[in-house]
Image (spheres, rainbow, N blue to C red):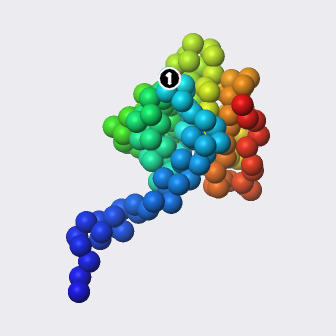
Amino acid sequence: MSADPGIALIHRSGGHPGTFFTVWTNLFQRARLMAGETVLIHGGSSGIGTTAIQLARAFGARVFTTAGSAAKCAACRDLGAELAIDYRADDFVPAVTAATGGRGVDVILDMVGGPYVRATSRRSRSKGAWYRSRSCRGAALRSICSR
């Protein structure tokens, strides 16, 4: 018996409810992201990133993201990111600073880590929340600031 074609598509595209669980836990349960707040999502074109963009927008947040190419940034904008920065071509810190009027973001979801840590810490509001989810570079850390 063959599987439903829709199920095969989900399998090939990497769709998995685990991304929704991860995003929901980090953005909404831990960071308590709310409508009208700002979120910076590093790795916006990843599975976690694309899910985070869509859920954050669906719940009324302003979404900023980083990705590794112009095409990936375009895909992030198509999913709902207000601002997508190609980190290989541009520095995300001044772009996010300008987009928030110098205020910084309320929540940061970071799947990248490594060299992003110092720059990312400069973009979080003083009472913001920063959550790291399985770092691609270096060991994963628990949240380093909370509300």
Q: Can residue 98 be seen in the rendering of this structure? A: yes
Q: Quadrant of residue 72?
A: top left
Whether 7 is drawn above or below 48: the answer is below
Q: Is residue 78 left or right of residue 63?
A: left
Residue 18 pos. (x, y %): 50, 60
Q: Quadrant of residue 29?
A: top right
Q: How many marks overall?
A: 1
* Residue at (63, 16) in percent of width and height: 103
Residue 138 pos. (x, y %): 73, 55
* Residue at (68, 28) in percent of width and height: 128
Quadrant holding the C terminus: top right
- Give the camera-side residue of 10 and 25: 25
Residue 59 pos. (x, y %): 44, 34
Whether 32 is drawn above or below 16: the answer is above
Quadrant holding the N terminus: bottom left
Which amino acid is tagged 1?
Gly
Whether 138 is drawn above or below 49: the answer is below
Q: Is residue 79 left or right of residue 42?
A: left
* Residue at (45, 47) in percent of width and height: 51
Q: Quadrant of residue 131?
A: top right
- Where is mark 1, residue-wise? 36
Q: Secondary structure at mark 1?
A: loop
Residue that sits furthest to the top in the current view: 101
Residue that sits furthest to the bottom in the current view: 1
Tell me the crowding category of disc 1: few under 14, some 14 to 19, or many 20 or more residues within 10 angstroms, Cα based: few
